[in-house]
């Protein structure tokens, strides 16, 4: 039982950590844009490969708002062509008092894909003709819409805030905002910005919010990882600091590492306690089964046979407890993390560790059992 | 008949508190192959202790036991276990079977210990159960068997690896006289058919009548040994 609990703790915690890590690795969770209240240095998004992004901060001198055009110019000078700058502003749906991010997108080759992982499901993205028009592309599956069925051609009323520049930050004032109606021209499913965002043309958003040059981040598409590394180096050499996906993951790993270490400590303590409990259980079992051991000796069982028998029993208990703990822990973690982590290698590793611990825990009781004087236990029965 | 087992000045002493108790005292016995040797004596006279010493389950305080040319004091615990595996079978008053196993599994167990091939072990187990007259009860749990049937299972188990000698400690002590008689008849028929040697500790007069030699035990010592002739 103790072993089952130990493996349960191990599996639950591992499952949760893996779940959190996996979520963190999903690009949609990493996007830092979207909230201008807390605007930290702007980000350049360097896309390395599908689903993996590098972020480049605006200016390592601490200037929070780097002009989009200035940033693009500087990147161009070092041979990096930006694909689209992204600016997001927190807005409200007036009827529902629900906030969301309104994000601008730029036309590229007449039909922008803001992020390639946003799957267009209906309608279209922006074209040159949409410049300055109040049109939007939205996630049809967003919870923002409640029970309403959003379709192409619907009108979306958005409360745009009055945007003012403060000390190193933007201040959004919804009290002085205006309501703008957007025509929905395209629907997408899921994607990097999550479901609480709508996309409008870049020029439209600049015009409506009077934020002319501030971009949340600028995306750069590279063809290979080596390009990304090269760009990263170049960007750094031009007084732009880079925060790559690897830096972020390292920070995440550091935090998770401490958490994991804590969990590991608990698990090892639990293993230790379980092993001690198992030793006691096996000693009690051996005490109760002295007569049986005496019988086995009387029919020719050797001390080594008795030792192996008890160690095998201990290992079997570990196997059963380990499997119980593994499956219950995995399912509990799945309930909380939303994902079931289940692979043969993990099962084998966990079970092998548990069986080894239980086998070791069984050695002392087994040796004691092998030394039981057969004649005495048979005589007193 | 040839000598199978022999003791020389065999003694076993227990210290209880400040008192020294001689469970066996200077016992000199010779058991011939094919003997049915009965040891009789009052309770506490040391009969079971002697059987344990003869079976190598216990070590003597002094003296020696020989099985054929093997001297027990020179044998390790593992070698003594080997002797019990192949050459010595035990039958106890309270059967000493493993209750978690069926009759069949109990009989097969000694064969598994010596790693007898499966098909041979199965066939021999059924044969032994048939010889004991309990083949149809083979797959029953011990709790479903009567005392007599359990003792037959114990006898079958003792015979599993075809030992040269069987040491039986009060084999009929826990049975009614009719059932006890049947067990003794089985032993006698095994002795007559296979030349199986038996050393039986018992109070039972029936056993005494069946035996060809007797040892009278008192206060740990064998006071006299008698041979029984056909005319006795």
Image (tube, rainbow, N blue to C red):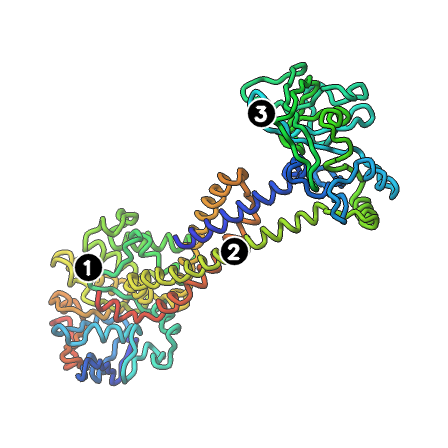
Helix, strand or loop at mark 3: helix
Q: Which residue is mark 2?
A: A262
Q: What's the mark number on residue A353?
A: none
| The quarter of the displayed image where residue A372 is located | bottom left
Residue visible at 77% across and 21% down in the picture = A132
Residue A144 marker: 3
Are the residues at dot 3 and dot 2 in contact (C-beta closer than 8 Å)? no
Residue B148 position in % (x across, y down)? 19, 55
Q: CA distance from mark 3 to mark 2?
A: 38 Å
> Label 1 marks which chain's residue?
B
Secondary-structure class at tag 2: helix
Give the residue at x 71% y 27%: A209
Q: Chain of mark 3?
A: A
Which residue occupies the foreground of this view, A42 or B73? A42
Q: Nearer the viewer, mark 3 or mark 2?
A: 3
Residue A223 appears in view? yes
């Amino acid at each position: 039982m103790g072993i089952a609990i130990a493996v349960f703790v191990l599996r639950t915690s591992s499952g949760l950590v893996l779940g959190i890590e996996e979520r963190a690795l999903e690009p949609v969770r990493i996007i830092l844009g979207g909230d201008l209240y807390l605007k930290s240095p702007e980000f350049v998004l360097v896309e390395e490969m599908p689903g993996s992004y590098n972020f480049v901060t605006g200016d390592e001198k601490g200037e929070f708002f780097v002009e989009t055009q200035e940033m693009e110019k500087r990147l161009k000078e070092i041979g990096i062509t930006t694909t689209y700058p992204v600016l997001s502003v927190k807005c409200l749906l007036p009827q529902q008092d629900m906030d969301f991010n309104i994000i601008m997108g730029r036309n590229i080759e007449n039909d922008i894909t803001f992020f390639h992982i946003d799957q267009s499901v209906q309608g279209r993205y922006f074209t040159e003709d949409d410049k300055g028009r109040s049109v939007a592309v939205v996630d049809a599956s967003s919870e923002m819409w409640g029970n309403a069925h959003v379709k192409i051609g619907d009108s979306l009323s958005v409360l745009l805030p009055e945007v003012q520049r403060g000390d190193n930050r933007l201040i959004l004032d919804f009290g002085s905002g205006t309501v703008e109606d957007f025509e929905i021209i395209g629907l997408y499913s899921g994607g990097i910005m999550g479901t609480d965002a709508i996309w409008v043309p870049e020029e439209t958003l600049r015009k409506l919010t009077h934020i002319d040059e501030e971009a949340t981040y600028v995306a750069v598409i590279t063809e290979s990882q080596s390009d990304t590394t090269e760009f990263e180096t170049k960007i750094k050499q031009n007084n732009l600091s880079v925060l790559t996906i690897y830096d972020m993951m390292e920070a995440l790993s550091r935090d998770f590492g401490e958490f994991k270490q804590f969990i590991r400590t608990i698990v090892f303590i639990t293993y230790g306690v379980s092993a001690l409990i198992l030793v006691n259980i096996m000693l009690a079992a051996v005490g109760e089964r002295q007569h049986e051991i005496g019988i086995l000796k009387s029919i020719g069982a050797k001390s080594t046979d008795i030792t192996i028998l008890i160690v095998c029993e201990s290992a079997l208990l570990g196997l059963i407890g380990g499997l119980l703990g593994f499956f219950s822990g995995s399912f509990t973690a799945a309930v909380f993390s939303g994902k079931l982590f289940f692979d043969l290698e993990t099962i084998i590793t966990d079970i092998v560790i548990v069986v080894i611990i239980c086998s070791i825990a069984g050695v002392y009781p087994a040796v004691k059992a092998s030394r039981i004087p057969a004649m005495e236990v048979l005589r007193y029965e | 008949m040839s000598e199978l087992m022999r003791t020389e000045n065999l003694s076993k002493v227990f210290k209880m508190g400040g008192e020294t108790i001689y469970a066996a005292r200077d016992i000199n016995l010779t058991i011939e192959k094919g003997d049915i040797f009965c040891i009789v004596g009052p309770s506490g006279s040391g009969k079971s202790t002697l059987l344990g010493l003869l079976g190598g389950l216990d070590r003597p305080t002094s003296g020696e036991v020989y099985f054929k040319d093997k001297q027990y004091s020179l044998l390790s615990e593992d070698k003594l276990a080997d002797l019990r595996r192949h050459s010595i079978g035990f039958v106890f008053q309270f059967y000493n079977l493993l209750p978690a196993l069926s009759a069949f599994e109990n009989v097969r167990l000694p064969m598994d210990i010596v790693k007898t091939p499966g098909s041979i072990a199965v066939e021999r187990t059924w044969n032994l159960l048939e010889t004991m007259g309990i083949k149809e009860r083979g797959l029953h749990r011990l709790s479903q068997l009567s005392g007599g049937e359990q003792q037959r299972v114990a006898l079958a188990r003792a015979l599993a690896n075809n030992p040269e000698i069987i040491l039986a400690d009060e084999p009929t002590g826990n049975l009614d006289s009719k059932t006890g008689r049947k067990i003794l008849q089985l032993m006698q028929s095994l002795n007559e058919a296979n030349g199986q040697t038996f050393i039986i500790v018992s109070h039972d007069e029936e056993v005494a009548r069946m035996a060809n030699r007797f040892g009278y035990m008192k206060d740990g010592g064998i006071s006299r040994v008698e041979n029984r002739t056909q005319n006795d």
